[in-house]
Image (cartoon, rainbow, N blue to C red):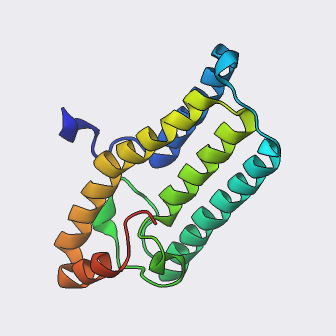
Amino acid sequence: ARKMLELKVPPLGVCALFAVAIVGLALAFPGANAAFPGHRAVAVAAVMLGVGVGGAGVIQFLRAKTTLTPLTPARASSIVASGIFGFSRNPMYLGMAVGLFGLAAWWSTLPGYALLPLFCAYLTAFQIKPEERAMQARFGDEFLAYTARVRRWI
């Protein structure tokens, strides 16, 4: 069953589902919302940071002329290891997670915050690890050296 989900659901789709769940939980359980002073400013800053981090990853992939299609990592033409990819091996996914944090902060939903680790765990299991296997098969020791010096998330 685990293999059935690997590289099947586009990460942006997973992010959208979690976003809907965060808002849904905030609306369904308003008693579990815990606003803090400045939560909307934190939310906007987090969403902007998430878009910036993710966007930087997209731009670097475009410059490297490698595939942006996350469901076919074996098509990668190169390892992008500079810029934002020197900080995180998965800046696009990191950007999504930070954006989801911003959404949870906007609504101040405690159950929404609780979904963030689940989002990261899902992407790690069903997207990132299969991508890493494909990249290791394609690029071998070069990819292993990259994974040794740059963390998966942050």
Say which quarter of the image contains residue 34: top right
Is 77 left, or right, of 41 in this rendering?
A: left
Give whichever of 31, 5 is nearer the camera: 31
54 relative to 144, above or below: above
Is 41 left, or right, of 54 in this rendering?
A: right
Is 81 left, or right, of 62 in this rendering?
A: left
Say which quarter of the image contains residue 148: bottom left
Residue 60 in the image: x percent, y percent?
A: 54, 77
Residue 69 in the image: x percent, y percent?
A: 43, 58
Residue 26 in the image: x percent, y percent?
A: 66, 24
Q: Residue at x 43, y 74 (%)?
A: 66
Is 5 left, or right, of 97 in this rendering?
A: left
Say which quarter of the image contains residue 119: top left
59 relative to 32, above or below: below
- Residue 65 visible, this angle: no
16 relative to 124, above or below: above
91 relative to 100, above or below: below
Give whichever of 133, 102 is nearer the camera: 102
Q: Residue at x 60, y 66 (%)?
A: 53
